[in-house]
Image: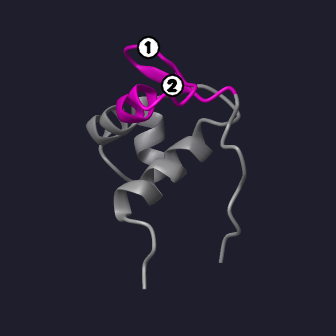
Amino acid sequence: MLLVGKSALLALRILDAIATRPLTFEEIAIECECHPQTVSQILNALADGDMTLQLDETSAFAPTGRPRKLARR
């Protein structure tokens, strides 16, 4: 049973992608295999939810990364 929805998993992948360096929405989309508009929507939702992100019109960076990394299978 999947405990986390697809959007939540994609949000985690996006945060992992921008944890070490700023990337454009296009670079994030390529790395996360999704559309740049989806990246923008998820990042804006995270920012609206008080996630510490540095966003501009074309790029994003999570200076604090994710609070913890989840084990990968």
Q: Which residues are magenta?
A: 43-63
Query: Which residue is found at the position 45% from the left and 74% from the top?
Result: 3
Q: Which quadrant would the C terminus be assigned to in this image? A: bottom right
Q: Residues within 10 Å of mark 2 (few under 14, many from 20)?
A: many
Amino acid type of the residue tagged 2 in the rendering:
Ala
Q: Name the spot of residue 33 as percent of width and height, x first.
A: 40, 54
Q: Residue furthest front?
A: 49
Name the side, left or right, on which 7 lies relative to 12. Answer: left
Amino acid type of the residue tagged 1 in the rendering:
Asp
Q: How is the image coloured?
A: one colour
Let me know if residue 9 is in the magenta part. Answer: no
Dot 1 falls on a residue whose secondary structure is loop
Residue under pointer 1: 56
Residue under pointer 2: 60
Name the side, left or right, on which 2 lies relative to 19. Answer: left
The answer to which image quadrant residue 49 occupies is top left
Task: Kindly indicate whether the residue at mark 2 contacts the one at mark 1 (C-beta within 8 angstroms).
Answer: yes
Query: Which residue is found at the position 71% from the left and 68% from the top?
Result: 71
Q: Residues within 10 Å of mark 1 (few under 14, many from 20)?
A: few
**Front position in the image: 40 or 23:** 40
Vertical relation: 50 (above or below) 3:
above
Dot 2 falls on a residue whose secondary structure is strand
Query: Which residue is found at the position 71% from the left and 34% from the top?
Result: 20
Q: Name the spot of residue 17 as percent of width and height, x first.
A: 58, 43
Name the side, left or right, on which 33 lies relative to 37. Answer: right
**Front position in the image: 41 or 49:** 49
Let me know if residue 62 is in the magenta part. Answer: yes
Query: Which residue is found at the position 55% from the left and 24% from the top?
Result: 53
Q: Name the spot of residue 70 as percent of width and height, x first.
A: 68, 62
